[in-house]
Image (cartoon, helix red, strand yellow):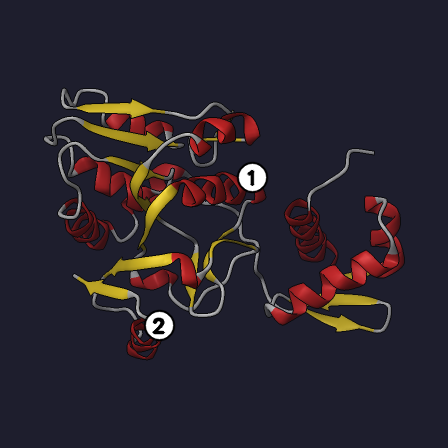
Amino acid sequence: MVSLSLLERQQAILTLLQQQKRVSVSDLSNRFGVSAVTIRSDLSELEQRGLLTRTHGGAVLLELIIEPEPAFAQRRLARREEKQRIGAAAAALVQDGEAIALDASTSALAVAEQIKKRRELTVITSGLMTAIELADAPGVSVVMPGGILRSEAFSLVGRMGHDMLAELNISKGFFGARGLTVDEGLTDVDSFEVEMKRALVAACKEVIAVVDSSKWGHVAVGSFAPTECLRRVITDEGAPAAMVKALRDRGIEVISV
């Protein structure tokens, strides 16, 4: 049996819940080759995040949390105008000569579209589409960490590029997400994507969220940038005022465009 990481196991539990609507501690323990104590801990953590409801001996589905990931082209077109404004505001923070990180999100791709005239700029990205977007920008050098191609997001994932990222000095990182909350920070739906984003976040001196208002108040299965890691959040004017205030009260700059 292949050993799963904590994130992979918890995502697998949620996937089973979507399929079966109910799971038991004993079945999960046998399925994943871990103790019942470990499974109960997983279920307790997922319940605290509002992703399931514990029952005697297991858990039941609370609501649909893991959704099929829309095709990249479909996500790129969704809320296109908001993403373009967010991308322009993010690009205004990028200076010539910097090294920045862009993840594989469509919001980060919108940033890439706006920085093609920068000079002596280095972009570290896990996004294949982002790399292609910048391929004809003469003043931009693109660095991609090694990994396995994840077709759903046209991203490179896996631990092969983590050592390289640890050696880089990245001034700013721009990250999209499937969800943003005050308590969980930035979250995403795929454990491999989360793992890569965590490595990128760890390599950045400044972490900037680029998330449109539809992502606010939602929590996906894996957190990759806790709230305390965030320096800025760039969003559109539809972001909920109470959450905007809560982030600002924590010293996070929120830019609405």
Q: Position of residue 78 (x, y in %)?
A: 30, 50
Amino acid type at image mark 1: Phe
Residue 203 in which image quadrant:
top left
Q: Position of residue 231 (x, y in %)?
A: 31, 58
Query: Which residue sits furthest bottom?
Result: 242
Residue 130 in which image quadrant:
top left
Q: Position of residue 211 (x, y in %)?
A: 32, 56
Q: Residue at x 13, y 34 (%)?
A: 96
Mark nearest the camera among 2 and 1 is 2
Judged left or right of residue 213, residue 25 is: right
Residue 75 in which image quadrant:
top left
Compare marks 2 and 1 and give the one earlier in the sequence: 1
Q: Position of residue 103 (x, y in %)?
A: 37, 39
For the residue pair 205 and 201, the one nearer the viewer reads as: 205
Which label sits on residue 250?
2
Mark 2 lies on a secondary structure that is: loop
In whole angstroms, how far apart are the C-alphas of marks 2 and 1? 29 Å
Amino acid type at image mark 2: Arg
* Image: 113 above or below 218: above
Q: Which residue is mark 1?
A: 192
User: Are there few (<14), some (14-19), or many (20+) residues within 10 Å of tag 2?
Assistant: few
Judged left or right of residue 139, residue 75 is: right
Name the quarter where the N terminus is drawn: top right
Mark 1 lies on a secondary structure that is: helix
- The reply to whether residue 21 is in sight is no
Q: Residue at x 43, y 59 (%)?
A: 179
Name the quarter where the C terminus is drawn: bottom left
- The reply to whether residue 55 is in sight is yes
